[in-house]
Image (cartoon, rainbow, N blue to C red):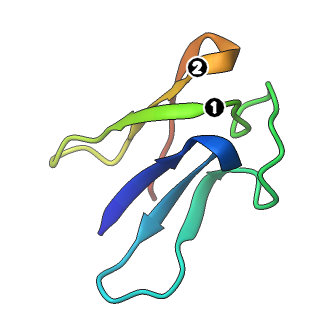
């Protein structure tokens, strides 16, 4: 799987091998920005370590780093 920080759509998506669409794991399905947990505003980066189940996402326009669960 590949995790993508989709800045203009304000969400994090998981893409499986040979997939035709991604699965939104955080953020709004419609790309609407927000400040509450699980909503983001310009996600420019994501860090995920192999042994962890929690990606860290740079929520740039909200001036924060968010941590999410993949479970």
Q: Earlier in the sequence, mark 1 or mark 2?
A: 1
Can you identify the residue that label 1 sits on?
Answer: 42
Q: Could you say which is closer to the camera, residue 11 or residue 54?
A: 11
**How many other residues sit within 10 Å of disc 1, few (<14), some (14-19) or many (≥20)?**
many
At 58% from the left and 19% from the top, the residue drawn is: 60
At 36% from the left and 78% from the top, the residue drawn is: 16
The image quadrant of residue 7 is top right
Is residue 10 visible from the viewing direction of this image? no
Q: Position of residue 10 (x, y in %)?
A: 67, 43
Q: Position of residue 66 (x, y in %)?
A: 54, 26
Q: Is residue 18 left or right of residue 13?
A: left
For the residues labelled 1 and 2, the Cα–Cα distance comes to 6 Å
Q: Quick check: marks 1 and 2 in contact, CB under 8 Å?
A: yes
Q: Is residue 37 left or right of residue 52?
A: right
Q: Position of residue 61 (x, y in %)?
A: 67, 18
Above or below, 16 relative to 59: below
At 63% from the left and 31% from the top, the residue drawn is: 42
Above or below, 10 relative to 34: below
**How many other residues sit within 10 Å of disc 2, few (<14), some (14-19) or many (≥20)?**
some
SS at mark 2?
helix
Is residue 48 visible from the viewing direction of this image? yes
Q: Quadrant of the N terminus?
A: bottom left
Q: Position of residue 9 (x, y in %)?
A: 68, 49
Can you identify the residue that label 2 sits on?
Answer: 60
């Amino acid at each position: 799987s590949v995790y993508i920080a989709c800045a203009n759509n304000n969400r994090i998506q998981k893409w499986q091998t040979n997939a035709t669409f991604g699965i939104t794991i955080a953020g709004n399905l419609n790309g609407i920005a927000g400040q509450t947990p699980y909503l983001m505003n310009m996600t420019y980066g994501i860090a995920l370590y192999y042994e962890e189940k929690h990606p860290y996402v740079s929520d740039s326009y909200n001036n924060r780093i968010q941590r999410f669960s993949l479970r």
